[in-house]
Image: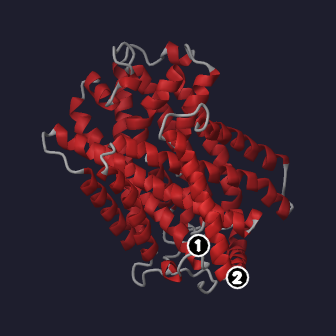
Amino acid sequence: MSNKNNNSYGLKSKVLSPLEILAQSIANIAPTATPTVVIPLVFALAGNGTWIAYLFATIAMLLTAWSINVFAKDSASPGTFYIYISKAFGNKAGVLTGWALLIAYIGTASAVTGGFTNYFNVFLEYFHIPTVNAIILTLVSVTIAWYVAYKDIKLSVRLMLILELTSVSLIIILSIITFIVSPSIFDANQLKLENVSIDHVRLGLVLAIFSFVGFESATSLGEEAKNPLKNIPRALILSALFVGTFFILSSYSQVLGFNGNPQTLDKSSAPLNYLAVRGHVGFLIPFISLGAVISFFACILACINAGARILFHMSHHGLFHYYVSKAHATNKTPHVAVSIASFLSFIPAAILSGFGVSAFDIYGWIGTIATLGFIVTYITISVAVPVYLRNKGQLTIKGIIMPALSIIFLFIALIGNLYPLPPYPYSILPYLLFAYLLIGVFWFALVSKRNPEIGNSIRSDIKDIDKKHALDSASL
């Protein structure tokens, strides 16, 4: 059963400012997680080329943002890529993309609970307070995120904005202090790419792109954003630029700060703590840990918001039970979908924690599946651009070259997760994603057989979306 096709989804309409839209994308990236966890891993592969790996990753995400914006400038809805791909390749491809994006958002939310629990306990240990069970912390983080997402979208994005600005500001301050206490801001080894090969950068690029996944999540706020055809595309570009610059700065300063240290950056379990001590600002250590906790929580919240809206819109077309497409009468949030997304985010992390899996392994295992889901959707959207533009009679050389460059960068990241074959269990994770996508194919075939009107429902809704935004698009 599907809901009546109209674009009054029951959500708050046009209430989010450009800054609040930007907050959704930045929070979904969880920028503080990269300096605390990912940059040391990139350094292990790229060495002095760590900053260049992040420069290339930033370029890759800007190219991907350009491809996404080809669609985002024409239409806006809670369905994001699910609707975009349907417009280019039809309903089956669109639904499969929505299915992939669901595991990407929910998987990311579940993965970063590992980061939340780890750094929450690191914060407690600094004050010699007994640590808290990982399952309890996972439940607390997801429950609070569920409540905020259930209650009000404006509360969600404003809270995310404050939390991320706070945590990112702490790391920027630490980077500046590192520059000040270093003999020179110019690191010849990094600037000359000493002992760095193309293969080193290629391998580092895989993890560097992982740092950005989720930056497109502002597209899920299409119904709630003010002037969405302008502000959402702008948020995607600005989030990639801002966070990319932050990552380049952080990676360069961390490698610089570890010069002369017997323990290399990739062997350090707490690189920011070392830099704080080296910069004579050890008092910042608990604030850095708290900043990481804050960033991970903001990411959980952002992923639940985005994943719930994908689930909500797919249910609007009858792809899930119609009850999931209901919006709260007072809060005007997709409260049922938010509850389901929150529950699904909690379960994998809780099960792994129950089996004694470490917080970092939870982050790595579930996060890898989520990342592969994002990369698949990014490649799909880039492939769809020339087709969509051709169908509109607007295909140009730029419309071919830009998505082609995006696909090249993304394929490097995708292949890097497959070859050379990573150790177990990472070696089986791509196959788990493939199995999940295969389930999505059979699931769509089943629901389509039970409800043949699903295809018409999607097509009708796309027409309504296009009609609704036709005047807005013409005015941009």
In the image, residue 356 sits, relative to residue 330, either above or below, namely above
The single residue placed furthest to the right in the displayed view is 393
Q: Which residue is mark 2?
A: 452
> Which color scheme did the rendering employ for the protein?
secondary structure
Quarter of the picture holding the N terminus: bottom right
**Quarter assignment of residue 456:** bottom right
Quarter of the picture holding the C terminus: bottom right
Foreground: 14 or 319? 319
Q: How many marks?
A: 2
The percent position of residue 275, horizontal first and vertical second, equals 32, 26
Q: Does the rendering let one see residue 31?
A: no
Q: Which residue is mark 1?
A: 314
**Quarter assignment of residue 206:** top right
Amino acid type at mark 2: Pro
Residue at (34% x, 61% y) in the render: 142
Q: Does the rendering let one see residue 220?
A: yes
Badge 1 local density, few (<14 within 10 Å), some, or many (20+)? many
Foreground: 379 or 63? 379
User: Is 14 positioned to the left or the right of 84 in the image?
Assistant: left
Kind of element beneath mark 2: loop
> Mark 2 or 1 closer to N-term?
1
